Amino acid sequence: MSARDTILAAIRAASPANDSGAIAAEAAALLRDPVRPALAAPALPKAFEVKASALGTTFDHVADMGAVPQAVRRYLDGHGLPPSLALQPAPALAALDWTGIDTHPALAPNEPAALGLALWGIAESGSLVIHSGPETPILLSFLPLHHIVVLHRDNLLAWLEDYAGKLAAQAIPRNAILITGPSGTTDIEGSYVRGAHGPGFVHVIMIDGG
Amino acid sequence: MHTATKAPFKDRAKAALADRTLKLAIDRTTGTAETKRAAAVANFPEFQAARDRGRAIKDHVIANLGHYLEMFEKNATASGAQVHWAVDDAEARAIVTRICLDAGAKIVTRSKSMLGEEIGLPHALADAGIERVETDLAEHIIQLAGEPPSHIIWPAMHRTREQVADLFREGHNPPPEAEDPATMVQSARRILREKFLGADVGISGANFLVADTGATCTVTNEGNAELTTTPPRVHIVTAGVEKIVPSTAHAFALLRLLVRSATGGEMTQYTTFHCGPKRAGDADGPEEMHIVLVDNGRTRMLADEFREMLRCIRCGACMNHCVVYRQIGGHAYGGTYPGPMGSVLTPVLDGLAASRDLPNACTMNGRCAEVCPVEIPIPTLLRAWRTRSWRERLEPGSLRGGLGLWAWAARRPAIYRLGSRIGVRVLRLFGKGGWISHMPLAGGWTGHRDLPRPPGRTFMEEYRARQKGTRK
């Protein structure tokens, strides 16, 4: 007997199989009236910003996509970084006017700063959502020291379950990642140190208008 | 588990109790963990309702484990992942080693996984001549020290910052410029960065296996897991069969409990779902993804009185709040999993004969069950091991004899009362100023704390005297 058959037979012997319709109904009932913490504020943008800021994520607000390059420049200048940026290969970003900033698609192992798009923001936890794909290298969110993320305020979701619903409604990507603040560790004596292997800085440029 | 010949539990515990630096290290981390968890629970007034729901989700999965494993296998396979099954640790090690060798792996990066420790993966990779690079900061620390983890969330909890500084000074070239945690973390970032990008295989565990998508989910704070699973050509996940959840939304319900209970945070920095290998056109990702589903005693637990232990989501709250763990630390337990949950699991994994001391190293104060996010009755399960140990006659003759004598006396009240009258008066002879600090045959107790000097009369004597008084 294969390992698979041995394991499944042992499971069947210990718990008799139930009807799959009944199992699905019970699983669905466990999701009804989800038990979750209150949002940090009644309005989603405020709730999201409160949660994300508490974890060290910083914010800038612009009216539209066209204003993103200036916001990026403000951030780089504010941190004393050169005007150079690894850019996510997404048409919405490539179409912007990057005069004065050197943008490049390739990521260096110690890339200082990168700019990418978040699909959604989750207000409950202050999390940004990234899905892998042809236009979204996962390493863009992990190699740089400064990770700058563009998020449209229309793409804010209230709860983790709302995101689960979005994910279930589409073809699931290879990687779906919720990024909640800069990387950190408490591995030495439990004391928090910001900036471990991933970005030490996460900066959100929120598009407030069209 | 890969078990070397070990000193008996009592000797390990005695050595741990004598180690003041160890006590300092444990106090620093568990103290912070306890405070932060309490604050996180206070900030989530519905925590008890969330616990009830989490427990119900786990019980639902445990009752339908076969159904969900088959669903997971079907969906993971459809995503392009290869699903393997392992009955025990030896099979799991062999599968992972074979995949690494087939991939021609020279360097393997690993993101922290207790299941990997359970199946003895570190030794198996070394035996196969493969360089293993631990990428979680705590795992990196203990790899430099050549030690196993001493805690399931903070594997290097037993090391003070001063000791970590010593290890980094030896193990990092160039050594860190200063010995504060922030500088040491930056040094590890610099050292490990090149390893991430040069690895042939990345191995991770899973906090959840999502049945309806076939995805595995890891939750981490450092960012090392994604740097481990993205660049190499091959990604291997090892996971216990009990990690399954019906859907992503069910995983989130458990995640809310897991993070608050483990670190006192609300959400880990990175919650990552891995679903198959790189897709056509994807910008990065591994060419192959393998998922090894490991039983290793779990289906045995499903069939006996330890079934509730399969609810465990590995948060570590039970050990952070355990008075015994906080005195002796994780290594003294001798198994992969320390503390209260480890004392339930180690007899399953290593056999009761080799680990019967662990269920006895418990005060039954019930703190572990109080803080358990899925309400596992850990003291009840430990008592079940004690009962089984008695039935299987694993207790030493001195204990069986002593308990037999006690039982004989307990059934004869006159003799029992006489015995306790003598006992109380003898105990008083060793007391000074209300406390007993030395007594023959009681060094195991008085070596570490004083025993209160008993009052002059037994409970029954006091009771009789008071009854007489009220009748007056």
Image (cartoon, coloured by chain):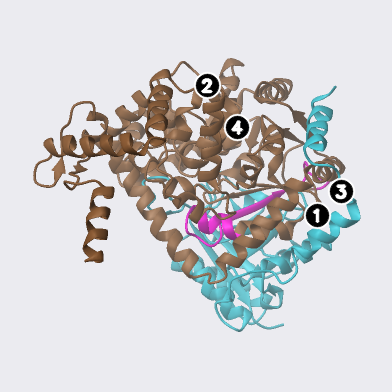
> In the picture, which quadrant includes the N terminus of chain B?
top right
For badge 3, the amino acid type reads: Asn
Label 3 belongs to which residue?
Answer: A18
Residue drawn where x is 60% and y is 46% of the image: B312
The CA span between labels 2 and 4 is 33 Å
- Disc with the residue nearer the chain's start (2 vs 4): 4
**Residue A66, horizontal then vertical, whole percent:** 67, 76
Please tell me whether mark 1 or mark 2 is closer to you in this view.
Answer: 2
**Residue hosting label 2:** B393
Relative to residue B137, is residue B144 depicted above or below? Answer: above
Q: Quadrant of residue B328?
A: top left
Chain drawn in cyan: A
Do the residues marked 4 and 1 share a common chain? no
Q: Amino acid at mark 1?
A: Ile
The nearer-to-camera label among 3 and 4 is 3
Q: Position of residue A26 (x, y in %)?
A: 81, 59
| Residue A67: x %, y % from top left | 63, 77
Which of the image's four quarters has the C terminus of chain B? bottom left
- The residue pinned by badge 4 equals B116
Q: Are marks 1 and 2 on the same chain?
A: no
The verdict on a common chain for dots 3 and 2 is no
Q: Which residues are magenta?
A: B256-281
* Nearest to viewer (mark 3 / mark 2): 2
- Can you identify the residue that label 1 sits on? A172
| Amino acid at dot 2 | Arg
Chain on which label 4 sits? B
Q: Nearer the viewer, residue B429 or B104?
A: B429
